[in-house]
């Protein structure tokens, strides 16, 4: 049985250009530090966030990221929701494969990020946009 | 515009990354470094990442590119001082930085570069091994 986590705090950041990435990463780090996340988990969360925000910039020219502080029993965590109105992903299974990329990158962004997070969900509609939701628990 | 300084130290180039890089800055560093290798005839490039708190796939790719490009220009690259949390994250991300030499700190990185451009030292070691086996 899974308990639905309670959202303690909500924040959102608009990403429109490359220079927004570093302040965004710092904001995520602030929240992670506030809940006492370990350095390794912080690094994983921020690295994953950096991958996703880059995808958003590259394929959708930006979007909005919601940052939520979660509580589930004794465990705290951070949920990030990346929402863009880009072209969408036609084949999500393919996009989740290591080494697949329609850009010039190495194709590690999505599958790599999934490995770094505790929860990972992606929804995409061609022509409408993409929503990626990730959760990293403090001790996850 | 912001720039990452590249210092020349004898036959080596020394880069200390002290800010979190955004993509354009990292790309500029890549081309600046390669141009500097050519301009200064550098035999080695040492990149200190000890104050970098995250390396994602883009930054990892830039480090790999720098190593490959400078190798083509006959210079070795050593990345030094990576934080443990960054190393753990890189491997889980699926980016083990193959082909990039690493060392624990600047001092060890310098030793590694020196041993690479002075093959005399390597021969010395082989001789030592011989001496051991014949004794």
Image: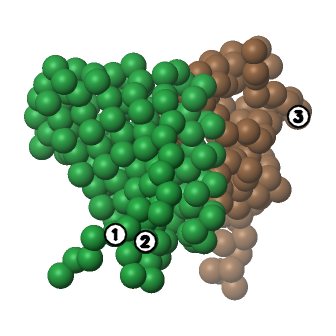
Residue receiving disc 2: A71
Chain designation of label 1: A
The shade of chain A is green
The shade of chain B is brown
Position in image of residue A26 (x %, y %): 63, 46
Chain designation of label 2: A
Q: Are marks 3 and 1 in contact (CB under 8 Å)?
A: no
Q: CA distance from mark 3 to mark 1?
A: 55 Å
Residue A5's tag is 1
Residue B9's tag is 3
Q: Nearer the viewer's eye, disc 3 or disc 2? A: 2
In the image, is A58 to the left or to the right of B88?
left
Q: Nearer the viewer's eye, disc 3 or disc 1? A: 1
Q: CA distance from mark 1 to mark 2?
A: 5 Å
User: Element at badge 1?
Assistant: loop
Neighbor class of circle 1 (other Cα within 10 Å; few <14, some 14-19, many 20+) is some
């Amino acid at each position: 049985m899974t308990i639905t986590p309670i959202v303690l705090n909500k924040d959102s950041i608009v990403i429109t250009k490359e220079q927004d990435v570093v302040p965004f990463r710092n904001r995520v780090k602030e929240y992670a530090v506030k809940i006492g996340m370990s350095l390794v988990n912080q690094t994983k969360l921020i690295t994953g966030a950096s991958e996703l925000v880059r995808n958003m910039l590259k394929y959708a020219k930006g979007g909005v990221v919601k940052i939520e502080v979660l509580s589930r029993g004794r465990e705290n965590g951070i949920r990030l929701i990346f929402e863009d109105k880009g072209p969408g992903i036609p084949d999500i299974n393919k996009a989740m494969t290591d080494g697949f990329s329609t850009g010039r990158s190495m194709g590690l962004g999505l599958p790599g990020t999934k490995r770094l997070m505790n929860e990972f969900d992606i929804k995409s509609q061609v022509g409408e946009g993409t929503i990626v939701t990730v959760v990293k628990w403090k001790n996850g | 515009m912001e720039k990452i300084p590249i210092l020349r130290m004898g036959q080596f180039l020394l880069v200390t990354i002290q800010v979190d890089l955004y993509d354009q800055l990292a790309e500029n560093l890549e081309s600046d470094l390669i141009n500097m290798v050519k301009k200064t005839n550098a035999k080695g490039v040492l990149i200190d990442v000890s104050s970098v708190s995250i390396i994602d796939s883009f930054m990892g790719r830039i480090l790999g590119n720098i190593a490959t490009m400078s190798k083509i220009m006959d210079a070795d690259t050593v990345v030094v001082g990576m934080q443990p949390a960054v190393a753990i994250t890189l491997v889980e991300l699926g980016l083990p930085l193959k082909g990039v030499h690493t060392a624990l700190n600047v001092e060890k990185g310098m030793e590694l570069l020196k041993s690479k451009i002075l093959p005399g030292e390597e021969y010395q070691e082989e001789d030592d091994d011989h001496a051991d086996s014949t004794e």
